[in-house]
Amino acid sequence: MRDQKLPLNMDAFPPPKIAERCEAAGILKAKLDFWTLMVLSILFPITAFVAAGFEHCVANMYFIPVALLVKKWAPQGFWSMVGKTAADYPDLSWHNFIFVNMIPVTIGNIIGGAFLVGLVYWIAYRRKEGLRIKL
């Protein structure tokens, strides 16, 4: 198996087969089946992120425009089914999406991703004795 090369056409391998290849290559050290690995590595961190009240600009670029499109174009049957009207969401607008949500969330993601995560990596992997931070 080690001498086998991955084909250029990755469509031949569904995700479980890719995970099996990664495990065979030593990339996945945990001896977990594919779906357990998916739940542990994707579902729980995202759930914790959302439960903590954090927002991510890329997720908001999908969810809020979809909500705006639903507000504008949903048929009356939809509104009667959910028991609301489009007028119940007056703050849902393109202006609020861009200026009240998107810009602050993007700035927060940049600060959190570039500076806070970078600081953790810098502390964890510093090499020189003179650069040590005493905590």
Image (cartoon, rainbow, N blue to C red):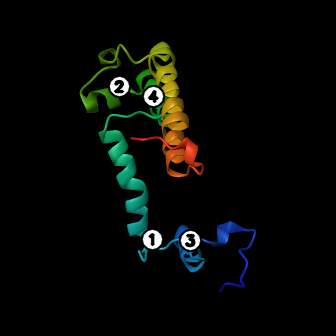
**For residue 34, which numbered disc appears in the image?**
1
Identify the residue at horizontal 60%, vertical 77% (top origin): 25
Q: Is residue 22 left or right of residue 47?
A: right
Query: What x and y, as percent, mark residue 88?
Result: 29, 17
Residue at the extreme front: 130
Say which residue label 2 marks. Answer: 76
Q: Amino acid at mark 2?
A: Gln
Alpha carbon distance from label 4 to label 3: 36 Å
Nearer to us: label 1 or label 2 = 1
For the N terminus, the image quarter is bottom right
Question: Label 4 vs label 1: CA separation?
Answer: 32 Å
Q: Amino acid at mark 1?
A: Phe
Secondary structure of residue under mark 4 = helix
Q: Earlier in the sequence, mark 3 or mark 2?
A: 3
1 up-or-down from 115: above or below: below
Looking at the image, tell me whether mark 2 or mark 4 is earlier in sequence order: 4
Q: In the image shown, does 85 or 124 lie closer to the viewer?
A: 124
Q: Position of residue 6 (x, y in %)?
A: 71, 74
* Residues at discs 4 and 3 in contact (Cβ within 8 Å): no
- For this orientation, the residue located farthest to the left is 83
Lower sequence index among marks 1 and 2: 1
Observer-side mark, 4 or 3, equals: 3
Q: Viewer-proximal residue, 125 or 75?
A: 125
In this rendering, the label closer to the viewer, 4 or 1:
1
- The residue beneath circle 4 is 64
N-terminal of the pair, mark 4 or mark 3, is 3
Task: Say whether residue 43 is visible.
Answer: yes
1 or 3: tag closer to the N-terminus: 3
